Image (tube, grey):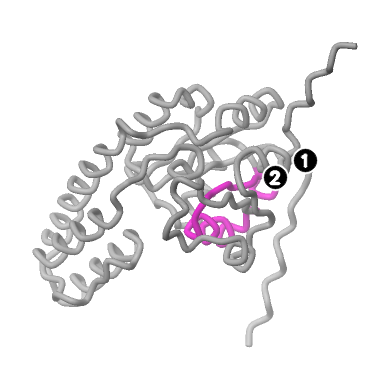
């Protein structure tokens, strides 16, 4: 048995904060079931056997399974490329349908404003498309806070690959031991722990909590250093909560 890799060393003070987008900073209520069904139909169209993919799996896992099956079956590279292009186009279209109803999660603007005022470098790492991510930031007024952004449309590895987070931190010029990744899903925890970056979890907003499997216990088991019920509590954990206003005497 190989020796256990030592736990990562985290240094203080923090210099940078990377956020997930959907569910963490904005609420858009995507139709993920429709996205998954569309992805599976597209994969079967290009040669994946019916019944081999499950609508219960997250999209990135389904893509990995479909890609692997197509390659193992000897499908021409052209089939794989066409599958990827077609499913991206279909999912992007479904995703954009949610943009008109996308709103900032309560507490997002005050949190980002406080982090900016304290001099933190702020980045965004999302599995949303570039078009949706920039549209959501514009619609919610959160765009000015983000000079550093990586989406599933960005060339190179995508979340949950740890390289996606590490690449973003290099662009931000923030060492990984002085950074924190904030997200609302276990995929975010998976990405952060694989990159050896500390992870702070935010529980789902009440408007999206129905049917969610994310919980404090699961986040802690997944490597979270802290779990917040909302962005106001996260601000306290990051020590950027504005002091209360003085009451006139």
Judge by depth and name the residue closer to the eye, 172 or 237.
Answer: 237
Measuring from the top left, give residue 29's x and y in whole percent.
Answer: 36, 44
Residue at 35% in and 62% down: 58
- Give the class, few, some or many, for how many residues have Cα within 10 Å of label 2's Cα (few <14, many ≥20): some
State if disc 1 and disc 2 touch (CB < 8 Å).
yes
Classify residue 219 by image quadrant.
Answer: bottom right
Q: Which of 224 and 209 is in front in this view?
A: 209
Image location (x, y in percent) of residue 2: 64, 83
Specify start and end residues of the magenta stretch as a single range. 175-198
- Farthest residue toward the right? 249
Q: Where is residue 189 in the image (x, y as percent from the top left)?
A: 55, 58
**Which dot marks residue 13?**
1
User: Going by the image, does 21 lie left or right of 45?
Assistant: right
Q: Where is residue 116 in the image (x, y as percent from the top left)?
A: 64, 26
Q: What element carries label 1?
A: loop
Please give the name of the residue rendered at 62% of the width and 66% of the height, measured from the top-left corner. 217
Of all residues, the one furthest to the front in this rendering is 249
Quadrant location of the N terminus in the rendered image: bottom right
Distance between the Cα atoms at labels 2 and 1? 7 Å
- Point out the image quarter for the C terminus: top right
Q: Nearer the viewer, residue 64 or 167?
A: 64
Task: Find out whether residue 199 is within the magenta segment.
Answer: no
Q: Residue at x 61, y 61 (%)?
A: 216
Residue picked out by circle 2: 178
């Amino acid at each position: 048995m190989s020796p256990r890799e030592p736990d990562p060393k985290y240094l203080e003070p923090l210099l940078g904060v990377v956020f997930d987008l959907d569910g963490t900073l904005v609420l858009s209520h995507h139709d993920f079931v429709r996205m998954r069904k569309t992805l599976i139909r597209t994969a079967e169209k290009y040669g994946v056997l019916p019944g081999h993919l499950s609508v219960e799996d997250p999209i990135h896992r389904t893509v990995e399974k479909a890609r692997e099956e197509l390659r193992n079956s000897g499908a021409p590279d052209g089939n794989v490329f066409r599958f990827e292009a077609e499913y991206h186009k279909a999912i992007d279209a479904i995703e954009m349908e949610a943009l008109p109803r996308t709103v900032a999660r309560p507490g997002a603007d005050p949190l980002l404003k406080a982090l900016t005022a304290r001099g933190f470098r702020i980045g965004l790492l999302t599995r949303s498309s570039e078009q949706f991510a920039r549209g959501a930031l514009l619609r919610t007024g959160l765009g000015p806070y983000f000079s550093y952004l990586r989406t599933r449309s960005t060339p190179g590895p995508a979340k949950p690959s740890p390289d996606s987070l590490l690449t973003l931190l290099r662009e931000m010029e923030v060492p990984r031991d002085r950074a924190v990744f904030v997200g609302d899903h276990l995929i975010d925890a998976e990405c952060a722990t694989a990159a050896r970056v500390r992870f702070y979890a935010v529980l789902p907003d009440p408007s999206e909590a129905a049917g969610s499997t994310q919980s404090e216990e699961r986040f802690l088991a997944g490597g979270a250093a802290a779990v917040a019920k909302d962005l106001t509590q996260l601000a306290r954990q990051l020590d950027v909560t504005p002091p209360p206003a003085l009451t006139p005497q």
